[in-house]
Image (spheres, rainbow, N blue to C red):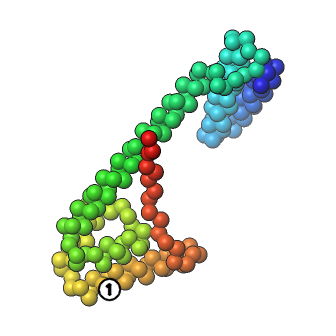
């Protein structure tokens, strides 16, 4: 964008900010305050881009040479990387915890865990795992199969209410970082 185009965009952003401010004042709605804040941020960014282009005496705005933009993009990528690492660590911790709970419960609990997985209940609390262990300790195998059947029928009914037929449950997806 040329400096002239940037000036026009800045004027339009300022106009939008004034309109949003007037609308927020008139109707005093929480959503309108958000619209005004967004318009103010947009106007400030256009002002920054225009000032940057004027300071560098460039004929056109080049985002590749805008250091503030490059720093902001790097910060955002870093924030996303940290969040992805945290999600992956939490997912791995849940998997380790789940495997440990399954070992504690033994093979008798396998029908319940299979029914739970088919129902799409992947994130169980420690209390949920304790309940599975208690059920397997106090119920006979025939009753456990009956409970697993109930979970399967509940899953089928939930899918029917959603209007889908036997769709496979979706496991949480964690993307692995590749270096």
Q: Quadrant of residue 38?
A: top right
**Is 42 placed above or below 125 here?**
above
The residue sitting at 26% across, 88% down in the picture is 142
Asked which quadrant contains residue 45, the reply is top right
Q: Is residue 157 visible?
A: yes
Pinpoint residue 46: horizontal percent, then vertical percent: 70, 24
Q: In this view, does 98 lie above or below 51?
A: below
Vertical side of 169 occupied by 94: above or below: above
Q: Which residue lies furthest to the front in this view?
A: 179
- Which residue is outermost to the bottom? 142
77 vs 14, left or right, is left
Of residues 154 and 93, the one drawn nearer to the viewer in this rendering: 93
Question: Residue, x 38% and y 70% (percent of image)?
Answer: 117
Location of the C terminus by quadrant is top left
Residue 135 visible? The answer is no
Q: Which residue has dot 1 on it?
A: 146
């Amino acid at each position: 964008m040329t400096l002239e185009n940037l000036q026009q965009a800045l004027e339009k952003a300022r106009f939008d900010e004034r309109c949003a401010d007037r609308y927020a004042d008139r109707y005093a709605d929480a959503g309108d305050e958000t619209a005004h804040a967004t318009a103010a941020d947009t106007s400030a960014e256009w002002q920054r881009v225009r000032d940057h282009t004027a300071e560098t005496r460039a004929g056109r705005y080049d985002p590749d040479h805008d250091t503030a933009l490059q720093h902001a993009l790097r910060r955002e990528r870093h924030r996303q990387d940290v969040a992805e690492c945290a999600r992956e660590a939490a997912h791995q911790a849940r998997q380790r915890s789940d495997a440990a709970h399954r070992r504690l419960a033994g093979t008798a609990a396998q029908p319940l865990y299979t029914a739970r997985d088919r129902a799409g209940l992947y994130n169980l609390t420690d209390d949920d795992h304790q309940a599975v262990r208690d059920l397997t300790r106090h119920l006979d195998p025939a009753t456990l199969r009956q409970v697993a059947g109930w979970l399967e029928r509940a899953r089928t009914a939930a899918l029917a209410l959603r209007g889908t037929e036997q769709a496979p449950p979706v496991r949480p997806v964690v993307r692995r970082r590749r270096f």
